[in-house]
Image (tube, grey):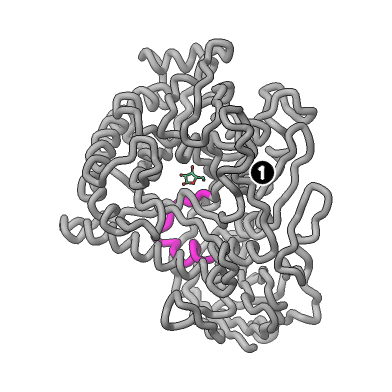
Amino acid sequence: MKVRIYANRNYPIGEIDKNIFGGFVEHIGRCVYTGIYEPGHKLADKDGFRKDVIELVKELDMPLTRYPGGNFVSGFDWKDAIGPKASRPSRPDYAWLAMEPNTFGLDEFVKWCAKANTAPMYAVNLGTNTPKSAQELIEYCNFEKGSYWSDLRIKNGSKKPHNIKYWCLGNEMDGEWQIGHKTAEEYGRIAQETAKMMRMVDRSIKLCVCGSSSRNMETFGDWDYNVLRHCFDSVDMLSVHAYFGNSDHNFPKFLAAPEVLDKQIADSIACCDAVAAQRKSYKKIMLALDEWNVWYRGDTNAHPETIWQAARPINEEIYDMTDVLVVGGILQTMMDHADRLKVANIAQTVNIIAPIMTEPGGRAWRQTTFYPFALMSKYGRGTALKLSSDSPTYSTDIRAEGIPFVKSSVVFREEADELVVFTINRSQDEPAELTAEFGCFKPTKVIEAIEIHHANPDAVNTADSHPVKPAKIAAKRVSLKDGKLTATLKPFSWNMFRISTK
Ligand code: AHR
């Protein structure tokens, strides 16, 4: 099959915000306990943080990490998890049916973030807690000194303010499963008052309000519009959550997840802009895709014998080669919306539907999806360019115009004088002959050509075997002549071409 793409410097989509490569650490399953935090592990540092995990998180280069939930946050009181550990209460976590020992809390998380080269994005509890509690929380974190809560932070060991910039106003408040679930009117009001009261403490923060928790929600669109009608002036971003699965073994549909997300993002932007139109406002609400991933095998009800224990092994999704294409494609969709998507958090970072896995007391390893994330995080920062592309398509019941077998994105990394082409071939059996042209750019050489491919779409990585990983594309399959890149993409492959423009 023949595929053509054409990119031009004069047609940028926008600067890709580095924060789209964010992670997510929730108190759920083994994400915190035996994931990032395991005192007594032979690789734990003096704070109990696993150094092997920190190294892998650094490799993913996640500039922002959302915390402490997720559904967990809606039943959580941040005050339970500060101060001397011996006096912190253990409490049942009703979201995930676990015991929460509270030995890892806000101050530990901020410390971990510094070691893992990431910044905290904190979700406040708007399920069972109040605007006042959120105001006290930001006073604890961002107020310098001289007030009750800031002085308590200092007493607890953090002289300097945590200066947390990104905040989520609750989590998935449209879902009836959420502890303290609300109607759009109830949530819109509390989000507005919380935003106002948090900004009284620190005007510089970025606030993200809960949008719909999935495109499948009956209230999708209505919820977003109605919530924003209450808090449009006080918030910066609307959250979007998107998980994709293949329980029905419908591969063509599953592989089209990037196109489904594209529509979800476009519709969410439409809601933001509809409220702006109605108010005659020029303000553009940005989007935060603050939970996304492939999730259909990791079972929330796994190991019922561990109910009311800490570190329950639930939601441990094992990723395969097919997921590499879906995760890579989703990251491309994010780049296609660089102008409006300013934050995204893969859910989650460790063990729970995550690119990193650990054994309690043992090894840590990279899942298959670790690789497209790490490479796109490293080389996918710069200006996303609009593409004119031409690929044969396949049909699904998703949309009338078909899904291109080959999906591509091009990023211009100006400071490196480099163009980076990311492309996935979703055909199971046909290679693709790719031709890429770059308009007025002057490409001089291919710096690197990398693919992720495995003949078995079900191939997975484990602690013992690592069959799915990046490899160099053989030189005879890539060439650059007269500024034109040609390459043969294997069937069912993720690919990256770095091209110098020096
Ligand atoms: O990421 C796992 C869970 O998925 C989160 O806690 C929740 O917000 C979502 O439903």
Q: Is residue 94 visible?
A: yes
Give the side of residue 441 with respect to residue 321, left or right: left
The spot of residue 50 in percent (x, y) is 71, 32
Image quarter (top left, top right, bottom left or bottom right) of the C terminus: bottom right
Give the side of residue 478 with respect to residue 333, left or right: right
Q: Which residues are magenta?
A: 332-345
Q: Is the residue 104 above or below the residue 71 in the image? A: above
Q: Nearer the viewer, residue 268 or 140?
A: 268
Residue shown at 63% from the left, 33% from the top: 305
Image quarter (top left, top right, bottom left or bottom right) of the N terminus: bottom right
Q: Residue beneath label 1, please?
A: 58
Residue 443, magenta (yes or no):
no
Q: Is residue 62 visible?
A: no
The spot of residue 127 in percent (x, y) is 35, 34
Q: Quadrant of residue 216?
A: bottom left
Mark 1 closeness class: few <14, some 14–19, many ≥20 residues within 10 Å: some
Q: Nearer the viewer, residue 44 or 497?
A: 44
Q: Quadrant of residue 498?
A: bottom right
Give the side of residue 343 with respect to residue 495, left or right: left
Farthest residue, direction right: 464
The spot of residue 292 in percent (x, y) is 51, 53
Identified by mark 1, the residue type is Lys
